[in-house]
Image (cartoon, rainbow, N blue to C red):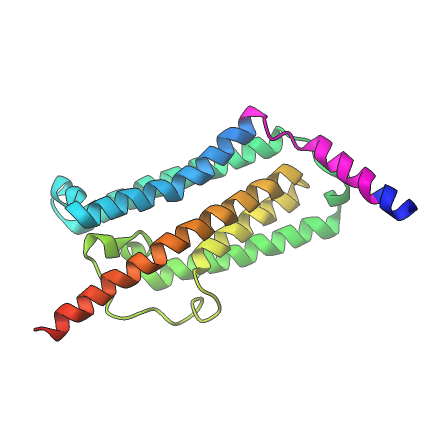
C-alpha cells in the first residue's frame, strides 16, 4: 500500500510539472505535426503536377529548394521544442548524472543514424527526390539501413529524447513522443507511396 501511495505521489508530481495548455508547448506540438504533413502534401502535389519542377525550371533545383525549406522548418521545430522545455520545470528524478549521460549517448547515437543516412542517400534521396522523378538506381541496404528501417526518422527521435533527458525535462519526453508518433504516421503514408513510384518505374522498364 505504501508503494502504491508513493507511485501515485510521483505521478501527481510529474503531472503538476506538465502543462499541456501552455502556449510554448502548443507551438512545439504544432511545429512537430506540421513538418511531416507539409513535406508529404507538397511532395505528393509535385509528383502529381510537377508544379515545383516547372516553377524552378528543373527537378533538381526544385528538390534542393524544398530541401532548404524542410531544413528551415526542422530548425524551427527544434527551437520550439527547446523553448518549450526551458519554459517548464526540471524533474528531480531525471536531474542526475546517470540520466544526463544516457541522454548524451542517445544524442550521439541519433546523430550517427541521421548523418550516416544522409551520407547514404544524398540530398535528393533524403529530401523526397523520388517524388520529383529523381529515382535511385537501387535500394540502399548498407549502414544504417541494415540496422533498422527509416534510421533518419528514428535517429532524429533519439536526438530529441536525448535532449529531453539531458535537460531533465518531462515536457521534452512528452514532445519526443509526439515526434515519434508524427514520424510513425508519416512512414505509413510515405512507404507505400514511394514503393508505388518504383513499381511504376519497374513496369515502364519492362515494357521498353
Task: Give the position of the C terminus as an image quadrant.
Answer: bottom left
Residue at image position (38%, 38%) is 73
Residue 14 is a magenta residue: yes
Residue 141 figure quarter: bottom left
In the image shown, does 167 or 135 lie closer to the viewer? 135
The correct choice, above or below, for 141 with respect to 130 in the image is below
Residue 7 figure quarter: top right
Tag count: 0
Q: Residue 161 at what x, y percent from top left?
A: 59, 48
Q: Residue furthest top?
A: 23
The correct choice, above or below, for 29 with respect to 187 in the image is above
Residue at image position (64%, 29%) is 19
Q: Residue 204 at what x, y percent from top left?
A: 13, 68
The correct choice, above or below, for 74 with respect to 157 in the image is above
Q: Residue 143 at what x, y percent from top left?
A: 43, 69
Q: Residue furthest left?
A: 208
Q: Residue furthest right?
A: 2
Residue at image position (16%, 42%) is 51
Q: Residue furthest front?
A: 1
Residue at image position (50%, 35%) is 29
Q: Residue 61 at what x, y percent from top left?
A: 19, 47
Q: Taking 93 as reference, is 208 left or right?
A: left
Give the magenta range: 7-23
- Assign the magenta stretch its main secondary structure: helix
In the image shown, does 131 or 92 lie closer to the viewer? 131
Amino acid at each position: 500500500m505504501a508503494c502504491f501511495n508513493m507511485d501515485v505521489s510521483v505521478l501527481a508530481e510529474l503531472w503538476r510539472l506538465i502543462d499541456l495548455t501552455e502556449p510554448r508547448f502548443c507551438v512545439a506540438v504544432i511545429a512537430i505535426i506540421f513538418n511531416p504533413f507539409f513535406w508529404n502534401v507538397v511532395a505528393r502535389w509535385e509528383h502529381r503536377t510537377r508544379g515545383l519542377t516547372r516553377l524552378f525550371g528543373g527537378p533538381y533545383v526544385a528538390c534542393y529548394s524544398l530541401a532548404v525549406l524542410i531544413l528551415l522548418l526542422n530548425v524551427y521545430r527544434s527551437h520550439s521544442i527547446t523553448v518549450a522545455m526551458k519554459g517548464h520545470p526540471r524533474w528531480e528524478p531525471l536531474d542526475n548524472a546517470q540520466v544526463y549521460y544516457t541522454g548524451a549517448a542517445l544524442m550521439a547515437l541519433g546523430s550517427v543514424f541521421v548523418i550516416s543516412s544522409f551520407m547514404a542517400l544524398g540530398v535528393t534521396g533524403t529530401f523526397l527526390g523520388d517524388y520529383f522523378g529523381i529515382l535511385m538506381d537501387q535500394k540502399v541496404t548498407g549502414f544504417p539501413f541494415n540496422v533498422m528501417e527509416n534510421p533518419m526518422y528514428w535517429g532524429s527521435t533519439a536526438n530529441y529524447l536525448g535532449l529531453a533527458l539531458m535537460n531533465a525535462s518531462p515536457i521534452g519526453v512528452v514532445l519526443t513522443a509526439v515526434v515519434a508518433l508524427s514520424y510513425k504516421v508519416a512512414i505509413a503514408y510515405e512507404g507505400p507511396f514511394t514503393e508505388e513510384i518504383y513499381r511504376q518505374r519497374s513496369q515502364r522498364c519492362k515494357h521498353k
